[in-house]
Structure formats: structure tokens, C-alpha cells
């Protein structure tokens, strides 16, 4: 038997162990008290409205949603997809280590570094972020391969992941902005003399062209989306906090991360990879300039952890005690910080440990203020309760073909469509993509509205002359839910002009978008 076979078998066994562990942890470290996240509902509903583009995100997520729908749309499948993307990210890290001729220790180091970091939390949510990190990691892998092997196929693989990354999240453009100058000012600029680069660019443009055409035909809604994001969320971003966040994301793996950054700058064996550290630096500066959210840059880190792991595996080759301490710190500190990184605590437990979460910055929301729960956790409660109340209202309506269910926001609309017992309920909202999903082919006779009205609310008083009866069915009472207090109202016996008013409001909202 070849002497290398046992070692290879051991490596494969370790790889399979880490990939399975990644999937398992994505499920077991989420407290069952939490429901799906508001963003997940929107993405899942896109499967019912497949298109070349959406106002909220590019179209790739809708295709993943279509696959989830094909497998029954259960919570297990919703959680499995991002977990698989995280596992494939680890696989690419493993492949980069292999290419750098790193040993099993280096592979285990980078796998543990990825597992014991914020990437684990990222991969529990069905959002474009998981594929974003995967695409960035794959792009680095294929460029590293191309620069070493000079084989054209790697340029095409590179271009495919750039295109898929673009169709997943426009965030990938920041990586390209960082890559271009980094390659131009190093010896790697010879890539621009390779005709296959331009053919690969054409391939990428061909893949993304349906979305580009959609953006043109719809007057570039991405620009307005960015404007709204800047006004409502990015305005609260602090640049210092952005840079602090880069290291807090990998605080348990900090020695591996620093080793990666340091070795790419000073270690002579990695000198030919200096374009990577330049890309990292330039991209962070651009992100900071635009006051981006700190997690936008997460895709830069798996490759840095790879180089850190390979370097440390060489330095610590026979230093078994230090190696053991490194693993112990990585895993031990992650376990200690676990309640801050993963939703393992219930809301009551988080409130009971309020000070700890506040010190860790976990309670700060996009509005720049501290709240009782982390924002993501507050966004994962109250949805089932809402759907049940809406179902009660829905049952009271005799002619459901002339019913409209209108929510205040996309989270409410998506949660109703996901959790309701009536799968044809088709709740909509003037918010996000739902604005374009109204079905107004019949005059509206009854309306179910989810809103924060009270008895003296001017909006409620405005609606009264248009309906024969307005009844409050119930409201969300789940403690700490971001939607707590939102009421469900049944508006019956509408006058004929109601449909016209709703259509005009839709057009007005569209013009504002």
C-alpha cells in the first residue's frame, strides 16, 4: 500500500468531521424559542415571484428559495442551505491550504478558526451573506491557482464566481474595486495580457446580463435602495466601530488572523501573495469610506485565516504544547463567548445577563441605540402569533377572492405567507418587493390590515368612511418581539372606490422608490 494513503484517509476523515460539525452546530446552537428572521421570509417569498431582479436583492437568492420550496419549504431546509454554504466555504479553505502544501495541522487550524467565529452565526440565517462569503473565498482560490499554474480554466472559474457573487449581492463589487489596484501594482498585472481574462469577463457579463437589463428597465432600483440604506442604517455606522468589528468577528481566532496578516506582509515564502493583503487593505478602506456595515467585509477573512494557519503550522511544527494551547484558546474562548455570538440564550436569559450583552455591543441596533435584545433576535419572534391572528380574521371573510391582506412591512407580510394555514393568503405590503406583488384583478371588498393603530389613530379614522365595519382581531403580544403591539384589523364591506385608492397608493409608493 502507498505510504501516503493512510495520511490521505486521515485528512478526508477530518474534513468530513469538520463539515458535518459545521452543519450540526448551525442547528443545535439556535434556541428553539426563535422563529425565522424577518429577512428570511422575504427571500423565501421570492420563490413565488421569480424574476431577473428584485428591489431588495439580486435574483440568485430567489433560485435558492425555489429549491427550498421544491423540498417543502420546511425550517430544516431553510437552515440547511446557508449551513451548506458555510461548509463549502470551509472546503475551499481546505483546498487553499492543500495548494499551499499545508499539512493536516494547518487544515484543522483553519477549520476550527472558521467554526469558532462569527461565520458560524452568519451561516444560521438564510440571507445572501453566506453565499457572499463563499463566493469571495472561491474567487481568491481560483486567482491563487491561476497565478501559480497560469491555466486559463481558473480565470473562467474566477469569472463564474464573480458573476454568481454579483447575482447574489452587489457587495462583490467592493472586492473587485480592491482587487484591481492590488493586482496592477504587483507583478500579477501580467494577467491583463492574457486574452482569456477578457473572454472570462465576457462570460461574467453574459451571466449577469439579465439582471443588468432588469435594472435598466426598472430605472436602477438598486440606487434608490442604497440611498434608503444610507439614510436609515449606514448613517449610524461609526468608522472606528467598523474596524473594531473586523477583529471582534474573529476574536477567538485572533492569533490565526494576525498570523495570516503578518505572514502575508513579512514571511518571504508568502511574498508572491502580497496582492491578497493589498486587496484586503484597499477593500477595507473603500468600505470604511462608504461607511459600510462591518459584516460586509467578512468575505475577506477565510483566505487570511488560511495563510495564518499554514504559517503557524510551520512555526509550531514540533511545539505540541503551544499548539494545544492555541486550539484550547480558540475553542475555549469561543465557548465562553458563545451566548454573545449565537442565539443559544432565550430572551429572558439575555435580559437577565443584560450587562454582559451590552458590554459586548450585542444590543446595539441599526438605529444606533441599545435595546433589550440583539436586533436579529427581536426579528425572530412574534411571527407565528401574527399568522394565527391573521388566520382568525381570514376565516371570517366569506369571499376570499376579493380580500386583500396588507401588512406594514415585508417581515409581517412574509411571515403571514410562511406560517399561515392558508397557503394562498398572499399577504403584501407597500414595503420592499411586496410593493410589486399586489393582485388587484378584482375589486377589493374586504381588507385585513396589520398596523399599529389605536382607537384615536388618524389613519384609522380615515379608513372608517370607506368600510361598513372595522374590527380589531388581536395584536402581537410576544415579549421583546420587534413587532410587539402590531394589531390585526378586519375591514369589511368596502365601497367600490377602495380599489382605486389602493392602486393610486401603490403607484405613489413606486414613484417614491
Image (cartoon, rainbow, N blue to C red):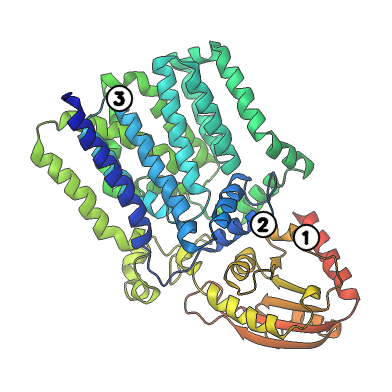
In the picture as drawn, the residue positioned furthest to the right comes out as 496
Kindly tell me whether residue 240 is visible in this rendering: no
Q: Quadrant of residue 476?
A: bottom right
Mark 3 vs mark 1, foreground winner is 3
Q: Mark 2 highlights which residue? A: 48
Q: Residues within 10 Å of mark 2 (few under 14, many from 20)?
A: some
Using the image, determine if residue 183 lies above or below residue 493.
above
Across and down, in percent, residue 51 comes to 70, 47
User: Which quadrant is home to the N terminus?
Assistant: top left
Q: Are marks 3 and 1 in contact (CB under 8 Å)?
A: no
- Classify mark 3: helix, strand or loop: loop
User: Is 214 left, or right, of 118 in this rendering?
Assistant: right
Across and down, in percent, residue 360 comes to 34, 60
Q: Quadrant of residue 141?
A: top left
User: Is 460 left, or right, of 381 in this rendering?
Assistant: right
Using the image, determine if residue 180 lies above or below residue 442.
above
Question: Which residue is located at x 61 percent, y 28 percent?
Answer: 204
Q: Residues within 10 Å of mark 3 (few under 14, many from 20)?
A: some
Q: Which mark is residue 178?
A: none
Report the Cα–Cα distance between label 1 and label 2: 22 Å
- Classify mark 2: helix, strand or loop: helix
Mark 1 vs mark 2, foreground winner is 2
Q: Mark 3 highlights which residue? A: 100
Report the Cα–Cα distance between label 2 and label 3: 44 Å
Q: Are marks 1 and 2 in contact (CB under 8 Å)?
A: no
N-terminal label among 2 and 3? 2
Q: Quadrant of residue 315?
A: top left
N-terminal label among 3 and 1? 3
Using the image, determine if residue 131 lies above or below residue 466.
above
N-terminal label among 1 and 2? 2
Across and down, in percent, residue 374 comes to 43, 65
Q: Mark 1 highlights which residue? A: 509
Amino acid at each position: 500500500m502507498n505510504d501516503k494513503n493512510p495520511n490521505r484517509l486521515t485528512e478526508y476523515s477530518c474534513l468530513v468531521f469538520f463539515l458535518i460539525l459545521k452543519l450540526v452546530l448551525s442547528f443545535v446552537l439556535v434556541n428553539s424559542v426563535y422563529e425565522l428572521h424577518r429577512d428570511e421570509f422575504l427571500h423565501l417569498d421570492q420563490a413565488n415571484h421569480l424574476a431577473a431582479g428584485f428591489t431588495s436583492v439580486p435574483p440568485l437568492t430567489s433560485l435558492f428559495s425555489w429549491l427550498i420550496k421544491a423540498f417543502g419549504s420546511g425550517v430544516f431546509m431553510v437552515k440547511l442551505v446557508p449551513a451548506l454554504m458555510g461548509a463549502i466555504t470551509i472546503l475551499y479553505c481546505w483546498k487553499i491550504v492543500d495548494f499551499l502544501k499545508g499539512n493536516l495541522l494547518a487544515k484543522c487550524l483553519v477549520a476550527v478558526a472558521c467554526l469558532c467565529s462569527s461565520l458560524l452565526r452568519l451561516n444560521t440565517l438564510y440571507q445572501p451573506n453566506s453565499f457572499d462569503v463563499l463566493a469571495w473565498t472561491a474567487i481568491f482560490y481560483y486567482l491563487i491557482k491561476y497565478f501559480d499554474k497560469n491555466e486559463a480554466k481558473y480565470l473562467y472559474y474566477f469569472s463564474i464566481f464573480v458573476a454568481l457573487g454579483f447575482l447574489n449581492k452587489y457587495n462583490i463589487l467592493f472586492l473587485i474595486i480592491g482587487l484591481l489596484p492590488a493586482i496592477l501594482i504587483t507583478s500579477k498585472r501580467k494577467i491583463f495580457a492574457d486574452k482569456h481574462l477578457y473572454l472570462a469577463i465576457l462570460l461574467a457579463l453574459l451571466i449577469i446580463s439579465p439582471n443588468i437589463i432588469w435594472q435598466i428597465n426598472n430605472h436602477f432600483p438598486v440606487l434608490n435602495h442604497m440611498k434608503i440604506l444610507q439614510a436609515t442604517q449606514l448613517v449610524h455606522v461609526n468608522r472606528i466601530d467598523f474596524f473594531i468589528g473586523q477583529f471582534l468577528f474573529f476574536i477567538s481566532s485572533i492569533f490565526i488572523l494576525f498570523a495570516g496578516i503578518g505572514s502575508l506582509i513579512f514571511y518571504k515564502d508568502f511574498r508572491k501573495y502580497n496582492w491578497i493583503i493589498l486587496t484586503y487593505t484597499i477593500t477595507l478602506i473603500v468600505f470604511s469610506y462608504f461607511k459600510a456595515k462591518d459584516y460586509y467585509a467578512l468575505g475577506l477573512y477565510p483566505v487570511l485565516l488560511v495563510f495564518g494557519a499554514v504559517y503557524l503550522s510551520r512555526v509550531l511544527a514540533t511545539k505540541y504544547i503551544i499548539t494545544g494551547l492555541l486550539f484550547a484558546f480558540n475553542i475555549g474562548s469561543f465557548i465562553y463567548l458563545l451566548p454573545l455570538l449565537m442565539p443559544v440564550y432565550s430572551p429572558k436569559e439575555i435580559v437577565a445577563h443584560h450587562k454582559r450583552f451590552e458590554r459586548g455591543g450585542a444590543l446595539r441596533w441599526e438605529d444606533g441605540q441599545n435595546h433589550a435584545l440583539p436586533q436579529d433576535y427581536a426579528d425572530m419572534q412574534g411571527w407565528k402569533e401574527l399568522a394565527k391572528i391573521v388566520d382568525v380574521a381570514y376565516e371570517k371573510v366569506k369571499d376570499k377572492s376579493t380580500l386583500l391582506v396588507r401588512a406594514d412591512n415585508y417581515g409581517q407580510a412574509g411571515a403571514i405567507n410562511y406560517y399561515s394555514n392558508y397557503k394562498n393568503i398572499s399577504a403584501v405590503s407597500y414595503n420592499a418587493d411586496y410593493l410589486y406583488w399586489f393582485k388587484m384583478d378584482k375589486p377589493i371588498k374586504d381588507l385585513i390590515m396589520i398596523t399599529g393603530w389605536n382607537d384615536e389613530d388618524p389613519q384609522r379614522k380615515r379608513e372608517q368612511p370607506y368600510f361598513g365595519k372595522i374590527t380589531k382581531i388581536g395584536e402581537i403580544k410576544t415579549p421583546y418581539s420587534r413587532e410587539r403591539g402590531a394589531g390585526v384589523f378586519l375591514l369589511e364591506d368596502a365601497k367600490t372606490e377602495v380599489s382605486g385608492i389602493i392602486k393610486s397608493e401603490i403607484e405613489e409608493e413606486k414613484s417614491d422608490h
